[in-house]
Each structure stands twice: as structure tokens, then as C-alpha cells.
Amino acid sequence: MDRTAQLTSRGEQHHVAYDPPPLPGPLHVRAARVLEENWTGASTVPSRSLYPHQWSWDSAFIAIGLRHLSPLRAQTELETLLAAQWADGRIPHIVFNPSVPLDAYFPSPDFWRSSTAGRAAGAPRTVQTSGIVQPPVHALAAWLVHRADPGLSRARGFLTRVYPRLAAWHRYLLHRRDLGGGGLASVVHPWEQGMDNSPCWDAPLARIIPAPSRSFRRADLTHGAPEDRPTDLDYGRYVRLATDYRDAGYDDNGGGGFAVEDPAFNALLIASEHALARIAAELGAAGTARHARAERLTAALVDRLWDGPSGMFLCRDLRGDGYSAPAPHHRPPSGTLIPERSVSGLIPLLLPGLPRDVVRTLVATLHGPHFGLGDTTRLPPSYDLLGEAFDPHRYWRGPAWFNTSWLLERGLRTHGEQERADALRESVLDLADASGFAEYVDPYTGEACGALGFGWTAALALDLLHSRPGHGVSPTGIGTFELSDKGGDRA
């Protein structure tokens, strides 16, 4: 029996530890095969060709899907990532596989120099990582993985071991990254937010002098179409920001040229803070303080990033409006909202504590002319359909992505929009399968773009496949997504 067959047949023998349908359908088998092919033995790569290492938020999303195949492997996925955590609490956005050649991906370990440049910040010495971070989906993923097989989780001490690391990760974001002084976490590089070339970054990046193109070699163009990828000018600015951050010892108090409060990044932090409260309660501690902190963060998110005229949340540029580096022990100015509609500004729909009028407006914006869901688009585009920078094929400037679609499906379900959530779920499953589990797709046609056999696309399709249409999400705590009833395969 091959490895994929083993993964998809175990549900008949182990109803607690392995919970795929007893007779998995074709979509289930195909998604499981992608995750098996991308497995390295300790973690899952997003794509064998384009992304040959472990990525932070990819692994969190992948673990959410893996829990339906093997909760043990899902736990291992997160444990491998957390083993590379820095002493200051940050979880790096890439954990490098030493068996992969240096020229297979740029920026490579010799660019980041984590063990030397990151020494003051407590970078690990035995594994090479990047020095920046990615969105904090990890506590949410850990809670969902635990719920997939609580017995196995307790027997292995899974939550007991990961909770201190996740708590340290949140402390880092809430204290070291509150660069605007308003309680929200900031990103210091577009790669940290995860939507690398979003038009939201055009204005903040315009202030950055790009690194010369001769100073780096892009490995991504070997495996991806140039018209689907960020431009060389984008990359020059990414490299400049990363170089400056590295050369400053990955110090977050240096007043770098890029600092943005992003709605999706902070919404995921809030969701994971609620999940940490659930984990604390599972371990016998009170979770009320974390729930209260999540509610305070939700209020700060609305206060600082909600824009009624736009009908959604916007990014706040902390280095805009004549910014100059702050004197020691002084807060930077509050910055300015960036007038660009990105899917990031819809992701806070995930949060149960939003005011009702904000929820109604977000749902209307998602299904209105700017994102067209259910009307002109099959999945939510990553950027405003009516925006001047919209491009249906270029990475985060318009294509639809499966992780943001999954988050919005969960958000709609959280707020009782079951029919809309069911329709989005069906579209995600259809397009994930039809596209060959593509990295992203044209939002109008569903045409595959980027890498095929993409890890989180397969994983999140599996997760939706295991949820029953028409059933809501527990309103008592974001991130629980208690799928107590298993649905059958649709294919």
C-alpha cells in the first residue's frame, strides 16, 4: 500500500485519531496526495518547486488540514516550526532545510545570517531561519489540532509544550511590535503580512530606495511566470528593507522605513489570542484575561483601522505623513490610513466581537462591486476589482487565494451568514480541485496561477470538506471552529 493510500484508509481503523470519511472520495484523496508529496519528514513545504523550505503561516494552515488525516503529523508540523523560535519570542517566517541548495530559493540562509546577525535577538544557533515573521495563525492552528484528537494531544503533552512558546510569540507582537502606540502589532516588511506585493504597500514602499537588481538573483522566476510574480522593482525594495533590518541586528526599535498596522495580521492575532484562552483553560488556567485582551484588541482594531466610507478596514502607514525617526522612549506618530481596498480589510470578519454595523458593512462590501463575490467573482479577489492597480494574475494584486477565502468562509459562518458561507465553501472546493490545488487563481475564471500542488490549498480544502454545510461556528470563542459533526465527501 502506498503512503497516500495509508493516509486515506486509516479512518476505518482509528475513528478518534484519524477522521477522514470511511470511504474517502476523489477530492479527499487528491488533497491528501498533495500533502503527502510535500511532506519532508518533519514539516510540509508549500510547494516542492517554488517554496522548498518551511514557511510559518503556511505550516499553520497546513496543520489545520492535516489534522483530518493525521493529528500526530499536524502536531509535528507545528512543533517543528516552534522549535526554531527566537529567544525574543518571534517565530521566523522561514525555517530553512539544510539539505536544500542555497540557490534554490532567494533570500537564502546566507542572506539572512540569522545565527550571527540575530544573535542579540536570540536566534537559534542550530537551525537557520529568516529574521522576519508572518501572520500569527499558530495558536488558532494549535487549538484546532488539539481538538482533532484530544486524547492523543494530552498523551503527548502537546498543548503543555507549545503553550509557553505561543504565549511568548504573542508577547513579542504585543510589546515589541506595537510601533504605533495604539495597541496593535505592526509589520516591518511586506513579506511579514504575507500579501507581498499588495497595492496597499505601493505608497509605503515608494519611499524605499531599492537594492540594485545586480545584487540579488530571483529564484522564483525559474518556476513561476514573470507576469504572475512581483516585479524586479518590488524585489529591490524588499531586499533593501530586509538588508537594513538584518544589519540592525533585527532590532524592532530602530525606526525602519516601513511600519504598517495591517487589519488581517491583527485580526489573526486576536483570533489566536482567543484560541490561547481556550488552550489555557484546557491546561487548567484561567483564560479570562486573554479573552479580555482579545476584546481590547478588537476595539483598537476598529478604532485605528476601520474606515466607514470605504466600507472596510484599511492599513495604517506609521511612517507616512512626514514621519521622522522617534527619539528614544518616544512613540512614533499615529500615521495615516492607506486608501486601498485589499482583502486584508475584510479578514476581521473572522472576529465575533465586531460591532453589528461593522459586520453588516463588511458582508455588503465583500459581495458588492469592489470584490464581487457571488456576482462577478467566484472567490474573493485579493484587491479591489475597481482599483487602478487591479491585475487578475499578479500575485496579491487581484488573484483569489484559498487561505483568505477559507478565513472569510469562517467569518461569514461566525456571524450567521450560513447560505453565503455555504456558497463560498462550494466555490473553494470546486476551484481547489479543478485548478490542481493551485497557489492562487484568477478570481473571475478560476484559472490556475502560481505553483500547483500548493500545500495550504490542499489542506484548507480538506478542512472545508470535513465541515458540514449550513452549520455555524461556535459564537463563544473565535478560532474554535468546533466541527463536531463530520460531513461526507462531495466528489
Image (cartoon, rainbow, N blue to C red):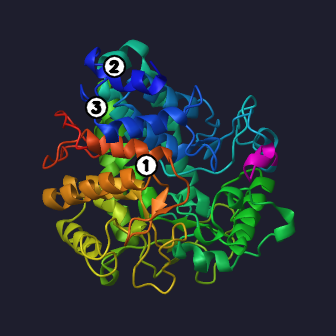
Residue shown at 22%/43% (left/top)? 490
Q: Nearer the viewer, residue 338 or 57?
A: 57
Residue located beneath label 2 in the image: 10
Q: Nearer the viewer, residue 63 or 51?
A: 51
Residue 263 appears in view:
yes
What percent of the width, then of the height, locates residue 141? Answer: 40, 38
Residue located beneath label 1 in the image: 457
Residue located beneath label 3 in the image: 24
Circle nearer the N terminus (3, 2) = 2
| Disc 3 secondary structure class | loop
Q: Residues within 10 Å of mark 1 (few under 14, many from 20)?
A: many
- Residue 85 image-quadrant placement: top right
* Amino acid type at image mark 2: Arg
Circle nearer the N terminus (2, 1) = 2
Quarter occupied by the C terminus: top left
| Disc 2 secondary structure class | helix
Name above or below for residue 162 compared with residue 227: above
| Disc 1 secondary structure class | helix
Whether residues under marks 3 and 1 lie with C-beta atoms below 8 angstroms apart, the answer is: no
- Spatial CA distance of label 2 from label 1 is 22 Å
Q: In the shown orientation, is residue 174 left or right of residue 29?
A: right
